Amino acid sequence: MEYTVQNLEFAVSVFYNGEPTERAKAHTWLTAAQRVPEAWNFVWDLLHPTKGTEIQFFAATTLHTKILRCWYELPPESYDELKNKILQAIITFMHGPKIVSNRLCISLAAFILQQGTIDLVGTLTPLSSEDKSYLLLEVLTVIPEEYNSMTMGTALRAKNRSALNQACAMVLDDMLRILNTVYNDYSSDQPPSDATINSWTSAATCVTSWLTLGNDEEADSVISFNDRGPLLRVLQTAVHVLYTCADPVCGTALEACEACLGAVRAAATAGDAHRYEAAALQLITDLVSLASPLFAAYNVPDSANEELICAMITCLVSVAECHTASLVRSVTPEGQCEGVMILLQLLLGAQAAPGHYPIQEMRSNLLFGIWYTLQDEVIHFSEGGKKMHPMWKELFSQLLSSLIMKSEIPPDSELTKDDEELLRCYRQDIADTIVYCYAILGEACFELVKQTFESSVGERRREACLHAFCALADVARRGCAPQALLDLLQQAVELVDATTDQRTLDTVLECIGTYSSWISSLRVAQARSLGECCVRAAGRSLCRSPAAAAVALRRLATECAAPAAAVVADIVSAALSAEGKHDSWVRRQLHSAAGGALAACPPEVAAPYLRQLSEQIVREITTHTKERGEQPAASDTCVGGGCGAALIASLRAQPALAVELFRALMPALYLLANSGLIESMLVVVKQTVMSLMDDCAPLADDLVALILIALEGEPTATALDAVKLTVLMIGDECPQVRRIFTHSVVLTIQILAPELANAMKTDSPPRYSRPDLMEALFVMLQLLSKKKPIYFDAIENVIPELVQLACWCMHVWEIRVAREACHWLGSLAIKRPQLIKHIAPDVTHAALRCIGGGSPRNQMEPLADLMLSMNRAAWGPGELAGWLRASLAAPGFPSALAAPHHKQDFIDAVLKEKSSKRRVLESILKFSLVCRGLEDTEYARQTMASRQLIA
């Protein structure tokens, strides 16, 4: 279809109004139309004022795309004509539609930057009249934004940066002139007009844009923080005027306040601001003077000015985070900066905002980051030989009390599903912040939580205290038992029976389970007594809170050996009685708990209980397989198999018991295998090998037999994982293990070979229907080539097919598959080079094809591993160099954009490096960018800079 105006209008109409399939086709065609040379002409026909908004927007977007992507099509003598046309279009659409006008302004910004900001003032002069000043303001605003987002060569970026730096002071002076109208006489009776407010919004937005120019390209800013004082004052004055003239602040006034506070944030944090301590402290003093009246007036739930308060808090937090070191240094024994003290109290007050998050307030969620930064700086300052000021302990004590209060959950009836998820994340943030409090307060945290718990009235406040107590479990010192901690844990145990609130019960059980590791670190008698109380409490609550109680039991039984052994009969009974009462997940937790308790008992005590558990599992599997035979649509997993695997895993400390259990389960495992429940059977096999490791040699015959049954059906990722583990653990002791390795590789090749053949027939990026199987195959091969290279003698006849498969996997747009294929080829080249020497040229060619554009750019790192291994492998002298030169000698390979000198530089860089993967990766990235036509672009600069930064 020709790119005529009529066809383009029709396609745009279809894109916005057609059926989904038609819209997709229209989108593809319109995207192609934006890249054709004719687009430079038809955009102006489509921008005619009589056309529809959708068509005009498409035209403006196409113009922007052409300037960004197809600038090379435009001869220099056409630049002035294009500039004049864009300016005329902007003026034509100055009264709307807004989306068209905005896109045209962005196009002008792109035009200016493509020229290297030549004569910026002259270009923008047609927009400098008073009636067009807002257009000039919009163009000025988008120029830095476009600079930050545009892809451009390094030389052009440097030229633009220099020109924009020179213009920055002039632009900010103009914005200051616009904003100075905030000093006029305004009141609630005569507030600023909407036009004036809009001008403040535009000016503040422009200020933010220019102050964030280039982001982190350079540390120093053209305008130092000291020189931003007048701008900061006028921005804060604008906010003060707006919130004193309106109650509440909303609409255009709220937008203006948010824009001004955003500009303050940018001015206070951009460039070298952190170097100016005095100016920072003065800004903090000014900001708290601005914020204090607002916070005092609207510190209520469901505040009418919640959005403005949130914007103010965001600004305060950003300033405080940037200048934390100055803030901490200002608190000295001789005195404190008054502005800093007020700021800290404002932040504390915001963290303790009245009302429940997220249904009555949203501000308290904005402060978590500042507490981490603050405690880190306080600790760093104290470690420098300075004694910690008592004020910090007082501050973090108040913070801890606030966090406990804010952790309180509102009534369930008030929460939607979205609110529940927000609250869950919020409480996790609270838990993290409580740990920061511990860094300052130490074990005093437990005393404070205890006092709050004991003085609490109502279940929700007690539950919040327990949530805070649970958060402190990870930092409780092992072997140390402060009285407040012991008292809290004892009260938690008593609350298990006393509470009738479900959420409180769940949190109590989480506390008991979370402190299991700490309990195990106490003196034996104390740990046994406390642990046994916890185990019994968790057991008693199984009926009321199955999931939480089961997790608590599992953690206690596996961490606290003596208490678990003392009540082993009760734990086993709970696991046996769970059948039919609880879901599969709860049952697996209970079987893990039973296994932990049995592992803590003498074998003669554990054996009868283990027999009961194994008999129940066998019965369940037998029943399940019979039912599945009668009902083919039944589940493909078996709960009994999962319980058996969980039980074996928890018996790791008692290998003899694990072996006994596996042998008892053997008849049931064969039933699972013969009934098509292969995955359930393999879960038990894998867990057995992982738990017993070298001790599973006596079970080798049965393990091999079960894995062979699984392979005969159809190899799966789980089956290959089981083969890998078996070879690693008992491959040397059991000759029959070699059989399952060979069999698994051959069968997997037979499944994947047809897909490989189909992939070779097409030029599109290969995609496989079994990426999980492909990944598992190469994970197994890669690990065994490192640990058991002798095994590859058994599959020498299929090595060529495996290598061919791996070469094609390099091209798969599945990063994990490609990575594992490269890692295996590299490992094999190092460990057994003679096995693949005759096909190593094909491996080299495939890797070069991927580097040159055959694989996505994010898949270069595995190829660096491969090339480094190929260079370190024990080939003959100069062989890798010969393979590289032979492949790259072909014209247009791997890309027509790679010149002979690019290829030679790449070969030299790869061959000289045999130790540093980083340097090999840099060489590969550089050559890949050349092959893709991205050399000397901003993307290339950022890519290489990021690699150097990581290094």
Image (tube, rainbow, N blue to C red):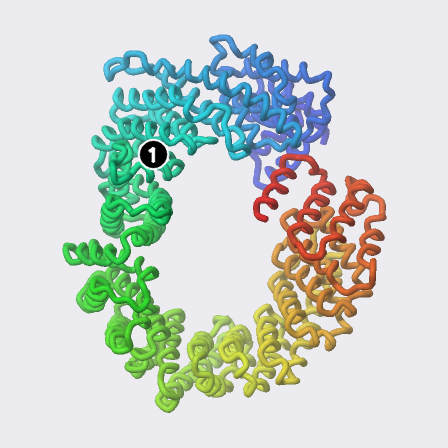
In the picture of the structure, the residue carrying the numbered disc 1 is 316
Q: Is 928 positioned to the left or the right of 139 in the image?
A: right
Mark count = 1
Nearest the eye: 241 or 210: 210
Q: Is residue 772 above or below residue 382?
A: below
Task: Please report the residue visible at 69 percent of the width from the left and 51 percent of the height from the top.
Answer: 920
Q: Quadrant of residue 27?
A: top right
Left or right: 876, with 164 as reference point: right
Seen in the picture, residue 747 relative to 193 is either above or below; the reply is below
Is there any visible trace of residue 296 in the rendered image? yes
The residue lying furthest to the front in this view is 385
Residue at left 57%, top 35%? 18
The residue nearer to you, when weighing 401 against 685, is 401
Q: Position of residue 949 (x, y in %)?
A: 57, 44
Q: Residues within 10 Å of mark 1 (few under 14, many from 20)?
A: many
Q: Quadrant of residue 783?
A: bottom right
Query: Taking 180 as reference, is 388 above or below it?
Result: below
Residue flagged by tag 1: what amino acid is it?
A: Leu
Determine if residue 577 is in view.
no
Place of residue 907 in the rendered image (x, y in percent of width and height, measured from the top left): 78, 49
Q: Secondary structure at mark 1?
A: helix
Q: Where does the N terminus fall, quadrant-wise? A: top right
Image point (35%, 17%), residue name: 194
Residue 431 drawn at (x, y percent): 32, 53
Q: Residue at x 82, y 56 (%)?
A: 883
Looking at the picture, tell me which residue is in the foreground, 148 or 249.
148
Q: Position of residue 729 (x, y in %)?
A: 58, 78
Q: Residue furthest bottom?
A: 604
Q: Hey, which quadrant is residue 111 in on the image?
A: top right
